Image: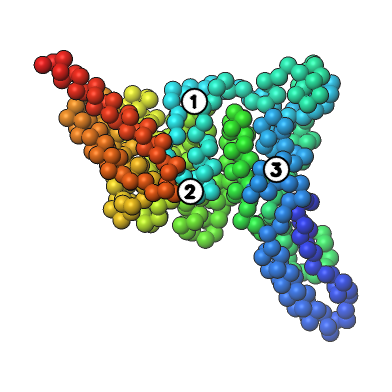
Amino acid sequence: MTPVCPFVKIPRPDDSNASKKSAENSTKHHVEHESKVKKDVNDSASVSPKCPLGYDSQTFKMGPLSCMVCKALLFETSKIVPCSHVFCKYVSWPVFISQIYLSFSLPNTYNVFLAHFILCVSDGRACIARFKDCPLCGADIEKIEPDDDLQGVVDRFIEGHARIKRSVNLDKGEEAAENNKPVIYEDVSLERGSFLVQQAMRAFRAQNLESAKSRLNLCAKDVRSQIEKVGNTSELCSQLGAVLGMLGDCCRAMGDSSSAVTYFEESVEFLSKLPKDDLEITHTLSVSLNKIGDLKYYDGDLQAARSYYFQSLNVRRDVIKNNSNVSSQVLDVAVSLAKVADVDKSLGDEKSASDGFQEAIDLLESLTLKSEASGLEQRRLSVLEFLRSQQADKQEQVEQTV
């Protein structure tokens, strides 16, 4: 059994007993050999291998295959001439972002990644294109050329990370096993998804959106494959919903609002299949609905925006029926009330807007934050300030009319 990734240490079965035996003992030999290999496979699958190059999903270490600019794994690797240092390639795309903001707190690992993804992209340039001199040695950049060989190594590393390949032709003898081995890929570590998302997050934060999108697509493909095998489990649907939301954020930052909406809608589709008593799932679901509403709002489709905002509000209202003491959930409801009311105001429905703003104000003014939730106070005050300003504008308009 040979690891796909040369950097993942997987114990090999001891084949010393695989010597040729007499014809009368061959059947016994194959039975014993198959039993031993299966035992080794099960033992290795229970081990979570660590990458000696430092690419651990739980830390932010950099390894030798990292780009020194974006800190993520190399993507479309390019080499500087004459110094030969390598970085991610320049990727050009239009960036049309009118407003991207973070208005929620996320406790889960996948959702923490998701929160970091909502960042504003300033100029759409990635990695080496930002420099006239090599950022490592200072040499003048005469030209930049692709390094396909190194990119091939990176691609093989990603494909093999946290995976091994196993023989499934155990009953055809040694000669067949040596020369014609069908193999299957199987994860031996639950860290692969987090590893891919971590690399994507690093790339996104450094404005290398194509790299981020590529890693996320690999992660989504892995999760979809698992869903095909075991069905729509809560864990897998939750993970896929979060990753699809991140892909939506990538597309939105790249100015591709149509693809962003598609990803967010698919995220909603998977998250809607899950039990509504899980705070993490319902929160992610409501966030995806709000993001679709945001895109519709920026596109000028106010009725569609209100529809998605209202769906998000209903999800959050249902949550606080049984979780009224969870401060973050109460804040979420206030934010959704503000979004719906803001659209109502734009649509000319002043009464509904005023009622929505006031309901949100009352909710936040009555909210008592516990000491462990003190970090939410700044957010509460920020939302409250916006709501009061909206009501003040309404009052001023009424006084001017009178």
Q: Amino acid at mark 3?
A: Lys
| Identity, as a three-letter code, of the amino acid under mark 1 | Gly
- In the displayed structure, 134 sits above or below 111; it is above
Give the foreground label among 1 and 2.
2
Left or right of 20, for residue 318 = left
Q: Quadrant of residue 20?
A: bottom right
Residue under label 3, please give it.
61
Question: Which secondary structure, mark 1?
Answer: loop
Q: Nearer the viewer, residue 358 or 90?
A: 358
**Image quadrant in which you'd find residue 313:** top left
> Is the residue under label 3 in contact with that under label 2 (CB below 8 Å)?
no
CA gap between label 1 and label 2 equals 28 Å
Q: Amino acid at mark 2?
A: Pro
- Dot 2: element: loop
Instruction: Out of 19 and 60, give the one closest to the viewer.
Output: 60
Residue 392 position (above or below residue 264): above
Name the residue tied to disc 1: 255
